[in-house]
Image (spheres, rainbow, N blue to C red):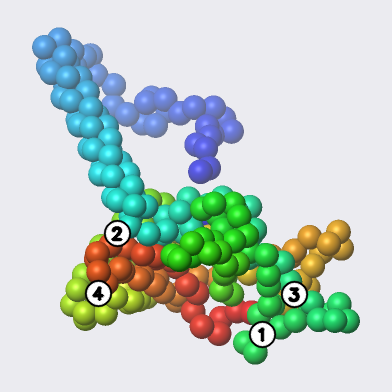
Amino acid sequence: MNAADADSESGPVDAHDAGAEQTDDAPEPAAAEDSQETAEESEATEGGDDEDDTERKAETDAKIAEFESQGHGPQRHLHPSTEALKARKGEPKADDNGNVKFKGNGHVETKRHVNPETGRFNDVKANGGTRPHGCGDYATKFDNAEDYVKAEQYLRQKAEQTGKPKVNATIEEIFGPGDHSDKFEGYYVDPANPKNEDGTVNHLLVDFRKGRIIAEFNESAGGLHAMYPDPRAGRQP
């Protein structure tokens, strides 16, 4: 994902107490025309900033709508709420004895993943059939549409340069040095304690430090099929 100024204990300090020189000559008041011009210039600047923000948002919204028509990137990795992300992770699988099952990498095996785009457990296949919705070790998303657009632009260039439809880059490559964890949100099931006492799934926040972003483009149409943030391998669990 400010301290307020305070007066001194003895009260506000005025010019005399601060040692300011006293004079008989008062400064001439600013001309009315000058004051009006300054106010108009200030209003024009503020209005320009608002217009720039509105234009930038409109451009971002248009790009996101374009991505939505090309694949399922924003639907699964930008728009979902926290609860939708957790529901996408599903619930732990258990063996015949009721013990939680684990993958070879230490993550919990899960089932009943809810597609955040449709709210359903099953996805429709190209041939008209259905299959269970899948989810990897993490359910992740971008928190900001502008960051999503910036990452897509960077990775699209990389895909065009390399000729590969699936590419990735580190988060710092795209957004610069530093910790950008506040740009993303993600969850995985706690291997040490997969379920809470009330039977609900126990999720942990994903650590995105030194992570990467993966994008997959449609080879035929050139559109964005999917794009999502992915944590550094081995950082968790």
Q: Which mark is residue 150?
A: 2
Amino acid at pointer 1: Lys
Decide: few, some or many residues near mark 2? Use Cα within 10 Å; few <14, some 14-19, many ≥20: some
Amino acid at pointer 3: Lys
Q: Earlier in the sequence, mark 1 or mark 3?
A: 3
Residue receiving disc 3? 93
Amino acid at pointer 2: Lys
**Observer-nearest residue: 170 or 128?**
128
**Which circle, 4 or 3, is nearer the viewer?**
3
Q: Residue 213 at what x, y percent from top left?
A: 40, 71
Q: Earlier in the sequence, mark 4 or mark 3?
A: 3
**Which circle, 1 or 3, is nearer the viewer?**
3
Say which residue appears at 75% left-offset and 63% top-offset. Answer: 201
Amino acid at pointer 4: Ala
Residue receiving disc 1? 103
Question: Is disc 3 placed on a helix, strand or loop?
Answer: loop
Residue 198 left/right relative to 163 = right
